[in-house]
Amino acid sequence: MDPKPLAINLFSVRRQLIADFEGTHNRIADMGYVGIEPMIFGPISLELLPEELRVPTPPAEEYRALLDRVGLATASLHGPLPEGDGADFVLDFADALGTDQLVLSSFMALPEAANAHADATVLAGAIERFSAAAELASARGISLGFHNHHFEWEVDLGGRFAWDLFWEGVDPRVRAEVDVYWAQTAHQDPVEVLARLGTRATRIHLKDGPCVLGEPQVALGEGRVDIEACAAAATHAAWHIVELDECATDMFEALEKSARYLLDRGISRSGDAP
């Protein structure tokens, strides 16, 4: 096992961030996490977002100062695809936070292509947009990534799933952030998914639970996912990133248990971020 530095995707604590932004970051660091994966939505008003996503994220330079103060690095950044008039905003934000990885969290976050998983024509257009955005990001020294859910394996597109068609057609500079829980929920073997991607899988999302749609997740080690096998298969991942979308127990308690599960077994490490 090659332990990788441990981070948390901040979607897990979106509600807690709204209540106490800096205090939540301090609590994350106290648990043993050394990195975060924040989310931004581009230069749009918070009032346009669902209430639970109205996280008052400070400007990038202020945010970087906060992270330096509490001792957290940025593992990667979830944000919009860098294209059009908003491209510089998201790439500048990633630069300021000191990360070389920008990730689109879902086709649902891609304007006019939210159903790319279910429509081959829309998917082809999404692939073209990803490829163009990857070239733009690469010029800034940033890799563009894509994070899966379960629905990339739901719809038959001429005998293939959107997941396979996407990786066959997209620019080879695009990287994968494999969410092992959603892959298993879609009846895929996450170890095999990681193996097929090889060097392209540069981030991994670790979560656990019953692998049943609509049911909440649990602390790592308390569900059906073989977390250790998944981490061992992610040989090219620079970070292990814990994410619990909805939890059956107190979120902070589950995140602390998850950190202890990974750190005590030597699966992940606390410190020495890349």
Image: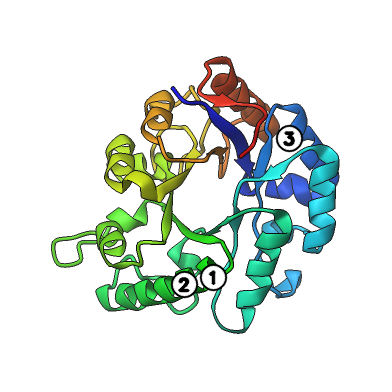
Q: Residue at x 27, y 45 (%)?
A: 196
Type of amino acid under label 2: Glu
Residue 1: where, in percent of width, then height?
Answer: 43, 22
Q: CA distance from mark 2 to mark 1?
A: 6 Å
Eye-nearest disc, 3 or 1: 1
Q: Farthest left residue?
A: 159
Say left or right for 119 vs 113.
left
Comes first in the chain, label 3 or label 2: 3
Identify whether 196 is placed above or below 99: above
Which residue, given by chain and number where applicable, does mark 1 sit on? 139
> For residue 102, what is the image quadrant?
bottom right
Q: Are marks 2 and 1 in contact (CB under 8 Å)?
A: yes
**Front one among 142 and 110:** 142
Comes first in the chain, label 3 or label 1: 3
Q: CA distance from mark 3 to mark 1?
A: 33 Å
Identify whether 263 is placed above or below 121: above
Identify whether 164 is placed above or below 227: below
Residue 33: where, in percent of width, then height?
Answer: 67, 32
